[in-house]
């Protein structure tokens, strides 16, 4: 949640803390819902929060208290619709207090700008207008502000970069459809040139500018087949960059190549994690290790401490057992995964290939159903005495059914 470490880190990295931005980053507000709100398609975000009402209320209170404990300065922010047709400020929530807390921008007093009374600040104002217009996807307005900035400071070192971003935004707006033969060039241009430039020039305003570009690319990748030779040239990668985690999950659940690619499996697992479906996250990683053990060991370090902790526990029990047995280990360690295995639609497309993992699953099912386990224990013993030993050493069955769940914090 929004504790002191989280807020302090945000202020250090971005120069500010805004609860709305943080909730978008944590997927407590899906980015697609935020886009609908910014385009004026919905009145507020009240129906978009993925947190329960009581959890949301606690989060708002905790964030405010934390910012005050850190002695941050609060500044109100106003949001307007991206379509340019609505002049009235947007409301995040119908509740005025909630709106104010979600919209507030908190900064450290030492970061507050100290204006020189003898300095003409017109150039700084013009540059901020360029940044705001780019973030608000108003590229004609950004161009006008850039011309003002160029007149005020012709030697400004960022003029060329700003012009490149504006030109790219205008290009995307004018060419919503991309010819199939141009998809790769558009993708690599965005991924390797535009995105790094936006990160360099726009700072914490890059998200909404880049999401506009990645959404356009995702729309044009709808019918583009996955290729292991170019795994990032895929709609799921574009959704990840937005990030639109719900759309990423939905796209990969229907992807024919899903269980043939460790990269797609890892990407879907990450999507489930961001959508607070942690048990599905573990299962996808278990299946990835069963099918692609070498790739699993190569990719696991990129997945965060939850998974690495489970992997370390797996190795600590017996560092010599094969990596593909990580799935069986997870099923025994967290029996609640069995219900997800039986009910998650995407997993109905796949069978457990490894005999040890199948035997572990059958034994856990017998345990949960309170059936006689003798035949299942004997089957697992014949296949893997180590896995049976792990099963027999387990004591916290009731606690394990509760752990994991669908929340990552």
Image (cartoon, grey):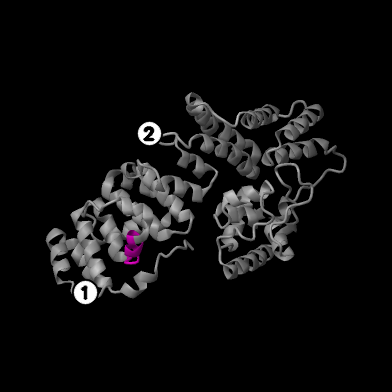
**Residue 379 placement: quadrant:** bottom left
Q: Nearer the viewer, residue 368 or 240?
A: 368
Residue depicted at 63% across the width and 49% down the height: 36
Residue depicted at 48% across the width and 56% down the height: 275
> Residue 329: within the magenta?
no
Q: Nearer the viewer, residue 239 or 301?
A: 239
- Whether 351 is drawn above or below 172: the answer is below
Mark 1 in CB contact with mark 2 (< 8 angstroms)? no
Check disc 2 and report its element: helix, strand or loop.
loop
The residue pinned by badge 2 equals: 227
Dominant secondary structure of the residues highlighted in magenta in the image: helix
Residue 371: numbered disc = 1
Residue depicted at 46% across the width and 42% down the height: 236
- Whether 366 is drawn above or below 132: the answer is below
**Residue 155 placement: quadrant:** top right
Spot occupied by residue 114 in the image (x, y as percentages of width and height):
79, 47
**Residue range (magenta):** 334-342
Left or right relative to 197: residue 81: right
């Amino acid at each position: 949640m929004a504790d002191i470490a989280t807020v302090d880190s945000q202020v250090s990295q971005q120069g500010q803390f805004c609860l709305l931005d943080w909730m978008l980053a944590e997927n407590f507000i899906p980015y697609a819902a935020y886009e609908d709100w910014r385009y004026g398609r919905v009145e507020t975000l009240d129906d978009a929060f993925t947190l329960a009402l009581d959890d949301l209320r606690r989060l708002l209170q905790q964030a405010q208290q934390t910012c005050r404990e850190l002695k941050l300065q609060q500044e109100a922010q106003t949001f307007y619709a991206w379509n340019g047709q609505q002049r009235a400020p947007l409301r995040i929530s119908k509740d005025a207090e909630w709106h104010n807390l979600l919209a507030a921008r908190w900064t450290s007093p030492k970061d507050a700008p100290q204006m020189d009374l003898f300095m003409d600040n017109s150039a700084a104002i013009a540059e901020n207008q360029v940044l705001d217009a780019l973030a608000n996807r108003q590229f004609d307005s950004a161009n006008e502000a850039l011309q003002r900035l160029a007149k005020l400071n012709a030697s400004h070192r960022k003029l060329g970069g700003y012009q490149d971003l504006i030109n790219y935004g205008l290009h995307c707006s004018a060419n919503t459809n991309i010819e199939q033969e141009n998809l790769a060039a558009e993708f690599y241009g965005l991924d390797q040139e535009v995105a790094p430039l936006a990160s360099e020039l726009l700072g914490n305003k890059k998200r909404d500018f880049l999401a506009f570009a990645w959404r356009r690319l995702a729309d044009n990748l709808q019918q583009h087949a996955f290729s292991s030779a170019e795994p990032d040239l895929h709609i799921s990668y574009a959704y990840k960059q937005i990030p639109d985690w719900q759309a990423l999950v939905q796209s990969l659940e229907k992807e024919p190549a899903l269980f043939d690619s460790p990269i797609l499996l890892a990407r879907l697992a990450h999507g489930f994690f961001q959508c607070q479906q942690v048990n599905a996250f573990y299962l996808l990683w278990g299946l990835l290790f069963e099918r692609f053990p070498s790739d699993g060991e190569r990719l696991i370090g990129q997945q965060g401490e939850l998974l690495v902790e489970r992997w370390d526990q797996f190795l600590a029990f017996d560092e010599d057992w094969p990596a593909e047995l990580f799935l069986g280990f997870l099923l025994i360690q967290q029996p609640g995964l069995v219900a997800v295995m039986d009910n998650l639609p995407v997993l109905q497309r796949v069978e457990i290939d490894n005999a040890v993992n199948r035997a572990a699953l059958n034994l856990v099912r017998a345990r949960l159903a309170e059936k006689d386990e003798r035949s299942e224990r004997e089957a697992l013993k014949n296949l893997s005495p180590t896995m049976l030993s792990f099963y027999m050493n387990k004591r916290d069955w009731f606690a394990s059914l509760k752990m994991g769940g669908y929340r990552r914090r």
